[in-house]
Image: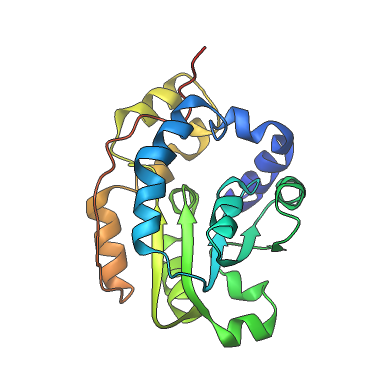
Amino acid sequence: MNQKELITEYYNRYAEIYDQKHGVSLAGQIYNFKNYYGPFLNQVLPVGRKVLELGCGTGFYTRWLKDQGLEVIGMDISPEILKQASRRCPDVLFFQGDCEDPAASLNPELVEEGFEAVIGINTLSYYPEKEKALLNYGKLLRREGRFILIDMNGACPYYQMMAWMNKNEMKEWIHLVKESNQHHLASLLKEAGYQIEQLEHFAFIPNGVSKT
């Protein structure tokens, strides 16, 4: 299987336990969202506008974005994980598709209208062709639109440790995650024609940290 087929198969298999397996519902995630994710997003999100969330997973962030008054369109590559997202967010329109090329799976009218923001939270790091993905996102943004990215810091030794421990999917995708370091992301964004407004490290603890 190629990388995208591996990713789809992985998330289909673990869709029902994704929130626990990847820390979305654990103490580390609660801490991160309260102290870093939420405050950052509140600064940069376009209030009350249409946004596209890529790699939406089980809809944890989708629910939060919708509750902020945004018109959210969600996309993920896994049909099984989208079932979980639809249960959590029955008021959101979801599309199954390749998040490196979302226009191929969206309704044509949505592509034509464009979005005020394209959002990726802990998802771009898994993409094999990040350069092409960034170019595709730019085509979906309206004038003055924003690409908003929160992602893993590929330079963090924690992820290499996860690979050594064969924890989650890190052994298969550590080489892709390593590309998501600040220097490389800045280069990719500039080469794709983005003007970087803000690029910083969040000093957060891994989402998978639990109280138990």
Q: How is the image coloured?
A: rainbow
Say if 70 sits above or below 6 in the image.
below
**Can residue 56 be seen at all in this image of the molecule?**
no
The residue located at (42%, 74%) in the rendering is: 135
Q: Front-most of 191 and 31?
A: 31
The residue located at (55%, 64%) in the rendering is: 69
Q: Is residue 96 left or right of residue 151?
A: right
**Can residue 80 be seen at all in this image of the molecule?**
yes
The residue located at (51%, 22%) in the rendering is: 166
Say if 30 sits above or below 144 in the image.
above
Residue 17 lies, in percent from the top left, at 69, 31
Residue 25 lies, in percent from the top left, at 57, 31
Q: Is residue 82 left or right of residue 37?
A: right
Q: Is residue 95 left or right of residue 158?
A: right
- Would you identify the image quadrant in which residue 90 lies? bottom right
Say if 116 sits above or below 85 in the image.
below
Say if 181 sits above or below 74 in the image.
above
How many numbered circles does the render carry? 0
Residue 142 lies, in percent from the top left, at 45, 83
Residue 12 lies, in percent from the top left, at 73, 42
The residue located at (33%, 34%) in the rendering is: 204
